[in-house]
Image: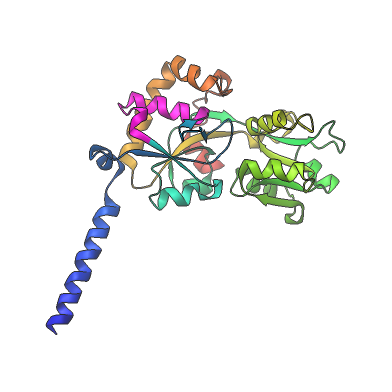
């Protein structure tokens, strides 16, 4: 009996220790000297890692500018690169502390992590073979032509394509931006759908093979806002981030200079009407 009670005591001690560690907030970890881990996939020009692992891309530049406003310097951060579909699971498994990959704020994502206030407003576009021989500019055209549509697993475009009636038999899901371009180059897909920025990056890399359609020909509802993601337990840090973000957005010159190197400009500044609460309830 004594041995049994001792075993129970050891088990409860371990359980208490695990619970205490998991309950530790991001704010307290940083105060203890831990580095802030930025989680993102490889999605040029949104977010990607440099040769030395440094955070590059306009979403990372915006995040780093806001963190500096909070008193957190770049050398107090480190990067964690994931496949796109692993960003939210990685955050919730404590393998990163912030998702800076450039995620659209969607109801399904809001259920699994908290978003900052929007950092920008963006649209999607189709990438097609040069000359657009099938005349594909939107989801209705994909259905009409029977074309094979490729997009990234976990991308907002998966939900959007299904919403606008694209059958699963016409859809191909791959891992991230790299997989999209590979599928198009190999001829396994007829058309790709992704963010306008991502499509333009692929167009530039295709040596004239592909072109990007006019995003205004996509459904108006595909316009989305992007936020930085945080664990549900890190409300205090998210709120402090939002306070710093408001200061940066009120005087965005420094942020626009840094993010502008990657194509972000004042046209992407989010309007007040497109809030995180609005996106979480309607998107």
Residue 102 among magenta residues: no
Residue 229 lies, in percent from the top left, at 44, 40
Quadrant in which the C terminus is drawn: top right
Judged by its main secondary structure, the magenta piece is: helix
Q: Is residue 149 left or right of residue 241?
A: right
Residue 112 at least partly seen: no
Q: In the picture, residue 207 is in which quadrant?
A: top right
Furthest-front residue in view? 52
Residue 60 among magenta residues: yes
Furthest-left residue in view? 2
The number of numbered badges drawn on the structure is 0
Residue 253 lies, in percent from the top left, at 46, 14
Taking the spot 43% from the left edge, 35% from the top edge, the residue there is: 116
Residue 214 at least partly seen: yes
Quadrant in which the N terminus is drawn: bottom left
Taking the spot 19% from the left edge, 70% from the top edge, the residue there is: 10
Furthest-bottom residue in view? 1
Residue stretch in magenta: 57-77
Name the one closer to the observer, 127 or 41.
41
Q: Is residue 113 above or below residue 8?
A: above
Residue 104 lies, in percent from the top left, at 55, 38
Residue 63 lies, in percent from the top left, at 43, 30
Q: Is residue 16 left or right of residue 95?
A: left
Q: Is residue 71 left or right of residue 189?
A: left
């Amino acid at each position: 009996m004594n041995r049994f009670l001792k075993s129970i005591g050891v088990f409860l001690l371990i359980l208490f220790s695990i619970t205490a560690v998991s309950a530790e907030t991001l704010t307290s970890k940083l105060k203890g000297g831990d580095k802030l881990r930025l989680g993102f996939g490889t999605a040029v020009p949104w977010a990607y890692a440099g040769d030395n692992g440094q955070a590059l891309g306009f979403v990372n530049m915006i995040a780093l500018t806001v963190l500096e406003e909070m008193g957190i310097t770049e050398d107090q951060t480190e990067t964690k690169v994931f496949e796109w579909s692993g960003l939210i699971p990685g955050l919730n498994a404590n393998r990163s502390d912030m998702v800076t990959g450039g995620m659209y704020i969607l109801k399904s994502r809001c259920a699994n992590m908290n978003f900052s206030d929007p950092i920008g407003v963006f649209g999607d576009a189709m990438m097609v073979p040069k000359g657009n021989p099938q005349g594909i500019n939107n989801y209705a055209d994909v259905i009409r032509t029977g074309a094979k549509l490729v997009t990234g697993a976990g991308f907002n475009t998966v939900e959007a394509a299904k919403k606008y009636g694209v059958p699963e038999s016409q859809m191909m899901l791959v891992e991230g931006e790299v997989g999209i371009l590979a599928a198009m180059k190999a001829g396994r897909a007829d058309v790709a759908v992704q963010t306008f920025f991502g499509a333009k990056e692929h167009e530039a890399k295709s040596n004239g093979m592909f072109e990007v359609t006019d995003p205004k020909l996509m459904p108006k509802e595909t316009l989305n806002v992007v936020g930085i993601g945080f664990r549900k337990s890190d409300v205090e840090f998210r709120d402090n981030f939002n306070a710093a973000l408001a200061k940066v957005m009120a005087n965005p010159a420094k942020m626009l200079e840094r993010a502008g190197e990657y194509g972000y400009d004042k046209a992407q500044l989010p309007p007040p009407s497109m809030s995180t609460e609005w996106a979480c309830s309607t998107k």
